[in-house]
Amino acid sequence: MFHIPLKGTLIVAIAFLVAALLSRGASAADQTLKRRPNVVIILADDQGWGDLSVHGNEQLSTPHIDSLARDGVTLDRFFVCSVCAPTRAEFLTGRYHPRTGVRGVSTGQERLDTDEKTLADALKKAGYATAAFGKWHNGSQWPYHPMARGFDAYYGFTSGHWGEYFDAPMDHNGKHVRGQGFIVDDMTDHAIAFMREKQQSPFLCYIALNTPHSPFAVPASYWDRFKDKPITQRGPDGAKETIDVTRAALAMCENIDWNVGRVLKAIDEMKLRDDTIVIYFSDNGPNSFRYNGGMKGRKGSVDEGGLRVPCFVRWPGQFKGGARVEAICGAIDLLPTLTALTGTQRVGDKPIDGVDISPLLKQTQDQWPARMIFSHQNGRISVRSQQHRLDDKGALFDMKADPGQTKNIAKEQPKVAAEMAAAVADWRRVVLSALGKDDRPYPVGFAEFPASWLPARDGVPHGKVERSSRAPNCSYFVNWKDLEDRLTWDVQVHTAGRYEVTLHYTCKPGDEGSTIEISHGESRLTGVVKDAWDPPLIKDQDVIDRPPAESWLKEFRPLNLGIIELKAGRAPLTLRATQIKGEQVMHLRSVTLTLLR
């Protein structure tokens, strides 16, 4: 039998004690990690409340999204904005979108003010790995870019709607690349790869899918299920329904569901199911007239059908599966709720409009305070209480007795109508007045993000120059034929220095050879369009005709114009021709200014 001397015994005892303390510390760290769950947020684009089989749509099957309702909590009265960018701003900040600088969906109006702080800012500060995938739609240039808003990584497109859905042009951490395959599948591939890479530490994975937003493109295997399918469920405006649009939207929704299933499967394979909060919702009502549970209105409307969307929250072991929350809530509530659930602190001290609804999710609070949720679109405001909606024209509806908003009861309930009208007037004065005039330039020249992309969407055509479509987001400039024509961008140069100028263009044979000048303040650079490049429009992706307001796109080629020396400050970035050789100068998709170090 071996005997350990007293001195040796003491050393061994100390060693055991240290090991025990270290073990306790590791255990505490593990417990902290469990208290900080992963967060996966999946946001659909233009998907209505009625576009799911769990909500009674018998025309399609969405088993994976339905499973989130079965295994999680359904937020039955969940409200967002009537169009895309405002909803994203409200979800990211917990604040009504007029407070955040977001006024619309294009030409710079979609930008989230740079002094706003996001959910990603909060979770990143708490040690989360953060990444966003898909449609950002709250600004393109640094510091509007998602990687300046709390996300460590980004793969997607920063504009609103996009014109290519197969092998699409994408932004990968600020660099322009070509995706692979169908855009939603591609985004999901990258999101799953991120989760697998970061599975050892808490992560925030924001997956902003861009369907069933138009253009209506989807893999053939999904379209084949619907192209000849009779559509028997219709909305209250069934006479306005375009059946092929409905078929295409539903096919895209089934593709979304497949990708949701892939995300959920990956979470299970990593054994992170119990440690991951999954949220699924949409950014506004349906983008066409189709079945939506009998609600009035669609995308763009401030009636119930334009604002009420599906929302499911799953956290196994923490939330009861199949639970339903009847209390009204909305996108503004997600930030305060998620910071509470993850045990993190909100970043920023601006007034917040959302509330922490975690007691509703946990079913720990029976009584919930009365509240009103306001909705705004282009000066039109409606307001929702638990029982009533006052629409933008002052009509009052009892949403429990009349969910389709068919009977105005303002005269029968004058006190309720007056109280809600007064609340709207106060909201208009306090919140909507925060918008003011939009005088924000497009910033360029940051060391953190040297390349600044200035798409046609953000520019202004002058003279006879036109956009390729009425919808600016994915447009390019055409009809540049005269020396008097100009293209301008309101640009604020942050850092003085040398910038490489790159244009993305096409030019028909015979039109090459024009001389163009780009200027900013006193700086000038002249170059020549040396090469013709005239690729065909990409017209083989859509399953139905593209809406006339949206551009067909093509492969734009980079033209390196040279190096320009820019001074810091604000001035129009102006592009003009000093000599035109052919019928027109070019078609222009964008200008990129890259700060050289």
Image (spheres, rainbow, N blue to C red):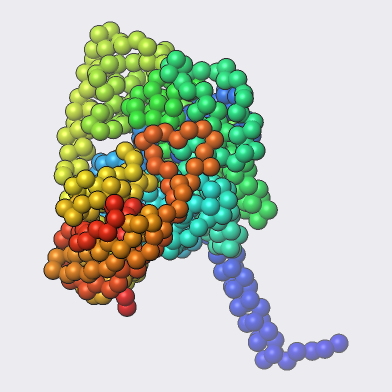
Residue 124 in view (yes/no): no
Q: Is residue 151 above or below residue 163?
A: below
At 23% from the left and 68% from the top, the residue drawn is 526
Q: Position of residue 108 (x, y in %)?
A: 27, 48
Left or right: residue 43 compared with residue 118: right
Q: Nearer the viewer, residue 53 or 438?
A: 438
Q: Nearer the viewer, residue 563 or 81?
A: 563
Left or right: residue 579 compared with residue 260: left
Q: Position of residue 209 (x, y in %)?
A: 49, 44
Left or right: residue 234 compared with residue 297: right
Q: Is residue 505 above or below residue 523?
A: above
Residue 476 in view (yes/no): yes
Left or right: residue 503 compared with residue 437: right
- Outermost residue, top direction? 412
At 34% from the left and 15% from the top, the residue drawn is 397
- Outermost residue, left direction? 522
Q: Nearer the viewer, residue 88 or 27?
A: 88
Q: Position of residue 310 (x, y in %)?
A: 49, 32
Residue 257 in which image quadrant: top right
Residue 430 in which image quadrant: top left
